[in-house]
Amino acid sequence: MAEHDDKHHLSSLFEVGAERLKLIGDNAKLLMQGYLTGGIDPATVSERTLRRLISARVLYQPDDSHELKLRHPVTQLVAALVTDESRRAIHADIADKLVSIRGFVEGLKEAQRMGDSLRVDSQTLRIDEAVYDLTSQFEEAIFSLWHRLNSNFGFVSNLSDKIRENSRAQQQIQRLIDGLSLIDFDDLIELAEGNPTLRKILVSRLQQQMSAHHGSLLEVQIRLVELMTRFREQQERSLLVLNMAGFLREHPGFMVGDYSYRSQVPALVNCAAPIFPAAAVSLDKREQQPELVHLVHTLYRELAIKAKTDVVSVTADAVNASAQQQVVEARQQQLKQDTMAYFLYVCDTPQPHSALAFLIEQQLEWPAEAWLFQVLAEYNALPRHEQKLFTLTRDERPISQFNHVRIIEDLKVRYQAA
């Protein structure tokens, strides 16, 4: 069966490949013209031919405002056939392509400084092609991944080969993700500077295409997991059927029965949760009334004891909370009285007196920060006509030379008679 599938797969590949090579040959002049000029005008091509070339992955159109362009593999094929060394620059990895793009951008900037418009256009075209080569490499790799999932992965007949195909596909996905991570858009934005053409090519268009590639890789991974899960489910069913068939061949007299009527059940079958039957009191049986009365009295005593325990626990918690609240209120009242004593002391002193100095002199146990906050709060709480009798001075310092926040280190209050 597997050999038949492989032959069918090779036959379909032969037909598709031959058809697309013939399509390239039929449109050889058109493709060569697009190779030399860098693009093909859609108006010069019939709609039917255009659809066939795009569906065969020979041409592509970045967007509606651009001409049709040859895909990277076709461009490399033509460059190899005509030995065009200027176009047949095969880079080993993404880093080399990014270095080439940087070199083209520097050449473009140099041509702009020299006022060479022809070279500027040439360098812009080379940057556009280099960016397309970069994105098309990812596109072709993702397309090959889809092809692997739809062909190689589907024609594997056993689990070991499936796991190996899965591992190779995951490694290819990881390599693509590592390649995508090399593209630093902050660096490209800095490289493009204020040139709108470069920003469109290196930033907006490239970022849009990279986002699409990220989404495609995510879809490939989801599809890969779905295929592996489906194959394992199918393998479990087939193993169950095969093992059951082998067991029936070894035990021809085996008869399938209802396991619920057996006293000894195999461990594989006896894995269900136990059933707890429902019970209810039968009030219509007079002979069971003494036992029922005893159960009701016992339950009543247990509920009463539990209720008393809960009441005691709730009462104790309430008492503790009330005691803690009283302690907090007492301390707050004491702090307020000490603050008022400070204001009375200031009224008897002609010179402004420090709040921290009063705290130390009176040997009060309040934290310095809490004491200053309370003094400031009491001053702000005074009526307006009473505030005018006092002058409050803050001793402040900036928290740092780079921050405008200021810290109050001390307060001085002075009483001035009306």
Image (cartoon, helix red, strand yellow):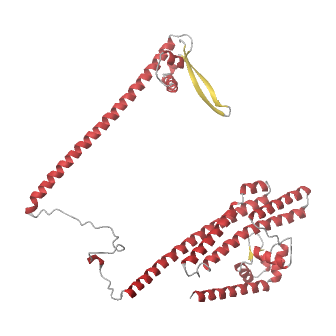
For residue 377, side relative to residue 325 (left or right): right
Q: Nearer the viewer, residue 327 or 33?
A: 327
The residue sitting at the front extreme is 250
Where is residue 375 drawn, in percent x and y?
Answer: 50, 23
The residue sitting at the left extreme is 287
For residue 403, side relative to residue 375 (left or right): right
Residue occupying image coordinates x 86% and y 78%: 82
Residue occupying image coordinates x 73% and y 59%: 203
Q: Nearer the viewer, residue 205 or 224?
A: 224
Q: Is residue 242 above or below residue 342?
A: below
For residue 195, side relative to residue 216 (left or right): right
Q: Nearer the viewer, residue 61 or 254?
A: 254
Q: Is residue 387 above or below residue 286?
A: above
Q: Quadrant of residue 243?
A: bottom left
For residue 267, side relative to residue 301 (left or right): right
Q: Quadrant of residue 148?
A: bottom right
Where is residue 119 drawn, in percent x and y?
Answer: 89, 63
In this rendering, does residue 403 appear at all? Answer: yes
Q: The N terminus is located in which quarter?
A: bottom right
Where is residue 75 drawn, in percent x and y?
Answer: 79, 75
Where is residue 41 drawn, in percent x and y?
Answer: 80, 75
In this rendering, does residue 388 appear at all? Answer: no
- In this rendering, the count of numbered labels is 0
Residue occupying image coordinates x 73% and y 70%: 137
Q: Quadrant of residue 324?
A: top left
